[in-house]
Amino acid sequence: MKHYSKQIFLFLFLVSIGIQGLAQTPTGFSIKGKISGLKDTTVFLAHYFGYNQQVIKDTAQVDAEGQFDFKGTKELPEGLYLIALPKGRYLDIVIGNTSFSFQTDTVNLIGKMKVTGSKENELFFGFQQEMSAKFEKLKQLDAQRRQKKDAASETAFKKHQAEIETFQKTWLEQNKGSFVVKLIKAAQEPEVPAFGKPVVTKADSSAMYQFQFNYYKSHFWDNFDLGDERLLRTPFYQKKLERYFEDLTVQQSDSISKEADKILNKVKSRDMRRYTIYKISSTYENPKILGVDGAFVHMAEKYYIGEPALWDTSTVRKMKERIAIVKPLLNGMPFPQMYLTDTLGREIDIRRIPAEYTVVFIYDPECSHCRESAPKLSKMYPALKAKNIRVLAASIDRSSLKWKKFIKEFKFEQMINGIDIHKNPQTGKEEYYTDFKNLFDVYATPVIYVLDKDKKIIAKRLPLEQIEDFIDFHKKQNQTIKK
């Protein structure tokens, strides 16, 4: 596979975050720890940046007594951090106040934790210790009811369950205003109330499921403070965004764009806003689902080009360049003119190809993936042609020799074959007119487009194996609409 361009958005985003971090006013930090059972090793302090990235802020050497000190002259951004220990173990801590100490034991990192000088961490570990003790008791009661199988054991189990729920609600209310409460709530799911009608028929079941879905979606962000930038440095925000757009949003460009606008209307802080824009945009730039890249165009135009103060000039410029390529290739757009000649040197006009559907297969004769796909396409073609589907195979390599060798090797003679070679009638020299990279977004090959009878794009980057099924589905959809 030949690559001609790569996504640069994550790189630019992380670089600019780093630059902004350097501009913060330094106040320093000192976090002293003692972990019994740990000695003569190195530990790392890092904050979460989503659930699958951590940003290391400091390292410290552990002495023979298990003592270490994270310290620096620059301010630590607030959020949920982790201390990475040897053998893959780690310890989460809250960074708000950046001058405190703690001690614990490797035997039970949370259970043995004692914190001095940080109210947030006292709350954080105190809650975990309380809950751990309560769940341990619940586990014992569960074992008893399973063994005895009597009413008293069942009652004791359910009573303790209710006590845990009451404790959680009371504790969260008593400590509201703390960042720890926000952390706990951020990880909670919405509680869906009972459906208000008896479920008897299939229609009732359908209505119940629709009610549950609508309630869950409309209350999905209730416990998450989109205005608190500290939550950016936790595992929870990335998970929430992914869940919301993957599971709760209709995968159509307009629906995705609408939901993105709703969320960004609530996200005001600079870094939180930048991350949200980046995360949604990058998801739909090269989407897993066909036909939703219009959401990427919406995000880029409204939030990158439309909010240039959030980004450096290079990012905005590159977004403009990307949109110039992608926007004309959205579903429903007429396929751009591709200047090609056939094996006899005659001009090919795609618009004049008589077919209900046209598959455009853009390839490089020396690309390994193209050579894997070619025999499959050749084998498929008779069945496609029988359905009034034609294939235009376009080589991006302008070597006539390689092109014709590829056609013969993979039996492409049955298809329409094109190459961007045009002889100037006056000079006799070869001229090239088609910019495959910028007009057809060819940064890797092969690339497949599917066009309808009017030569409008209905799919792009479609896997070869899905062509026939996709066209059959599209045809049935059109027939249903006409009825």
Image (spheres, rainbow, N blue to C red):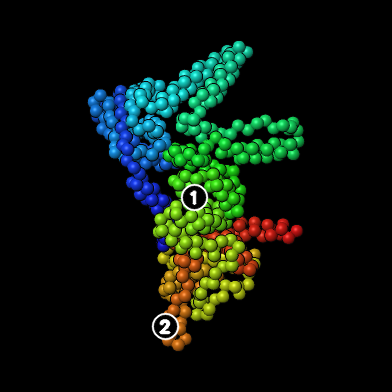
Q: Earlier in the sequence, mark 2 or mark 1?
A: 1
- The numbered disc on residue 232 is none
Q: Is residue 387 left or right of residue 187?
A: right
10 on left or right of 455: left
Determine whether 412 is above or below 48 in the image. below
- Disc number lying in front (2 or 1): 1
Quadrant, the N terminus? bottom left
Q: Amino acid at mark 2?
A: Lys
Q: Is residue 381 above or below residue 19?
A: below
Q: Residue at x 52, y 80 (%)?
A: 346
Q: Single out the residue that lies furthest toward the bottom.
A: 426
SS class of the residue under badge 2? loop
> Of residues 301 and 391, which is closer to you in this image?
301
Q: Is residue 64 left or right of residue 228?
A: left
Residue drawn at x 27%, y 26% is 67
Marks 2 and 1, how far apart at CA:
48 Å
Residue named by callout 2: 429
| Residue 4 image offset from top left, x and y in percent | 41, 62
Q: Along the horizontal axis of the image, is 178 left or right of 192? A: left
Q: Which residue is mark 1?
A: 277
SS category of the residue bearing label 1: helix
